[in-house]
Image: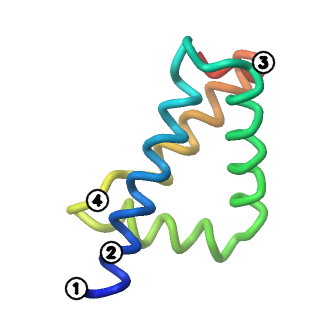
Amino acid sequence: LNFRQFLKQELDIFFGIFLRILSSPNSSFTQKDMVLQLLHKICQDRHLVVEIFVNFDCDLNRTDVFAKMIAHLAKCSQSGGGGG
């Protein structure tokens, strides 16, 4: 098994979990805040953001992680950080 493909599968699951936390009305403020802090750190690394876009959104077999991440961040910023 190609290590990169395995890592992409794991990261796809990882991002899915964190984005679900942001969109869930059952997630606590603390949980959402922790996810937002993580996404903030990720977005500070422009190379990492490009890698996420290229390896997920440009791959027809993967989830559009970058687009979903930006949509969730936009929703959180418009709702005052609640995200849900």
Going from the N terminus, do you reach mark 4 or mark 2 first? Answer: 2
Disc nearer the start of the sequence (3/4): 4
Q: Is residue 41 above or below residue 2?
A: above
Could you tell me the amino acid type at mark 4?
Arg
Give the residue at mark 4.
62
Snapshot colouring: rainbow
Which of discs 2 and 3 lies nearer the camera? The answer is 2
Label 4, secondary structure: give it.
Answer: loop
User: Is the residue 3 above or below the residue 45 in the image?
Assistant: below
- Farthest top residue? 25
> What amino acid does circle 1 point to?
Leu
Crowding at dot 3, Cα within 10 Å, few <14 / some 14-19 / many 20+, comes out as: few
Tag 3 and tag 1, C-beta contact below 8 Å: no
Q: Give the residue number, with chain letter if any, for mark 1.
A: 1
Amino acid type of the residue tagged 2 in the rendering: Phe
Q: Position of residue 84 (x, y in %)?
A: 58, 16
- Tell me if 75 is positioned left or right of 46 in this view: left
Query: How far is disc 1 from disc 2 in space, using C-alphas?
Result: 7 Å
Q: Which mark is residue 80?
A: 3
Residue 18: x %, y % from top left: 54, 41
Q: Residue at x 71, y 16 (%)?
A: 79
Q: Give how far across and how far down residue 4 sits, in percent.
A: 37, 82
Residue 69 in the image: state x and y as whole percent: 55, 44
**Mark 1 Cα-neighbour bin, 10 Å: few <14, some 14–19, many ≥20:** few
Q: Element at badge 3?
A: loop
* Element carrying mark 1: loop
- Residue at screen point 22% across, 62% down: 60
Residues at discs 1 and 2 in contact (Cβ within 8 Å): yes
Between residues 57 and 19, which one lies in front from this camera angle? Answer: 19
Instruction: Identify the element where label 2 is drawn.
Output: helix
Residue under circle 2? 6
